[in-house]
Image (cartoon, rainbow, N blue to C red):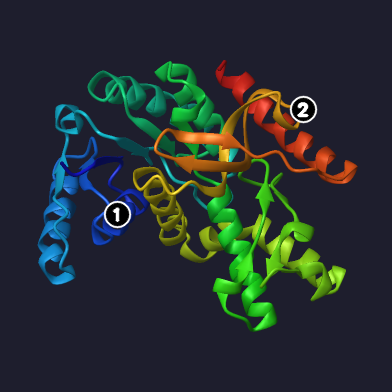
Amino acid sequence: MRKKVTVVGSGNVGATAAHWLASKELADVVLIDIIEGVPQGKGLDLLQAMPIEKRDSYVVGTNDYADTANSDIVVITAGIPRKPGMSRDDLLNTNFKIMSDVVGKVVQYSPNCILIIVSNPLDAMAQAAYKQSGFSRNRVIGMAGILDSARFRAFIARELDVSVENVTAFVLGGHGDTMVPLPRYSTVAGIPITELMDAATIERLVKRTRDGGAEIVKYLKTGSAYYAPSAAVTEMVESILKDKKKIVPCAAYLEGEYGIKGLFVGVPCKLGSNGIEKIIEIKLTPEEQAALQKSADSVKELVGVIGV
């Protein structure tokens, strides 16, 4: 029996995630939205692409959560997107209400699923989903670090004129202005980028990574990034469904790791069939630890506002 993945929200991120998931034949995909017709149309369009892609993934769009029953993974992208001049924090209260409603319905029909949260502000929405679902912490994961690391990797590869396959990058902390890229753990073919670039160049790339989402919003004007975020979701889904045990940066609920307790913060995680199978603790310099704590403090402020 094939695996089943539900994607909540049929906007750009959700529909593109459904596209990646189906085209990689990772699972049958259910695309659900409150808007009538849109998930059905996009789902049917994707289903008709499968013969061309030579994939047997079944894709269906719906407005009824009963169709999502017994999903292995549920990806939640629902929420209003950022607009120019709007911070992720501005989205907080509206998206919290949406998240609470969605998680309640998801848990009703798929009590054994793993949740991957994409809605912004990411870390606070993951915390809301965790509290609302009542799931163990290994089954609620925020997608942020893979995206932020991919942006950093892309910029490093362009700067050094090397293959992106050679580049690994490390980004910790919250998804937003307080993220913590770690240049000394970021490498090209195993060589730390601190050996290949001067400090000013690294700082420029770090800043561009930190502002990566806002840069795209500025260009698009009426929306935000969706190709890279949905590709990041797909990497997480693949690692879980195939039990690959990949170590990737994800937003996880910390219970004392890195000196942080009771908050979702981006850290390296091993993803396998049980979701987060291990949180990897690495040694940080005092400066890096301070930056990570600052990031956690900003998440704490947000979750305080919504009371989770």
Number of marks in the rendered image: 2
As helix, strand or loop, the secondary structure at mark 1 comes to helix
Q: Which residue is mark 1?
A: 21
Point out the residue furthest to the right here.
286
Q: Which mark is residue 259?
A: 2
Query: Disc 2 marks which amino acid?
Result: Gly
Check the image and report above or below for 143 versus 93. Answer: below
Residue 121 on image: x %, y %: 54, 37
How busy is the neighbourhood of tag 1: few (under 14 within 10 Å), some, or many (20 plus)? Answer: many
Q: Quadrant of the C terminus?
A: top right
Query: Disc 1 marks which amino acid?
Result: Leu
* Residue in the picture at 70% in, 29% down: 257
* Lateral position of residue 100 relative to residue 204, left or right: left
* Lateral position of residue 290 relative to residue 105, left or right: right
Q: Looking at the image, can residue 61 be seen?
A: yes
* Residue in the picture at 23% in, 23% down: 109
Q: Quadrant of residue 116?
A: top left
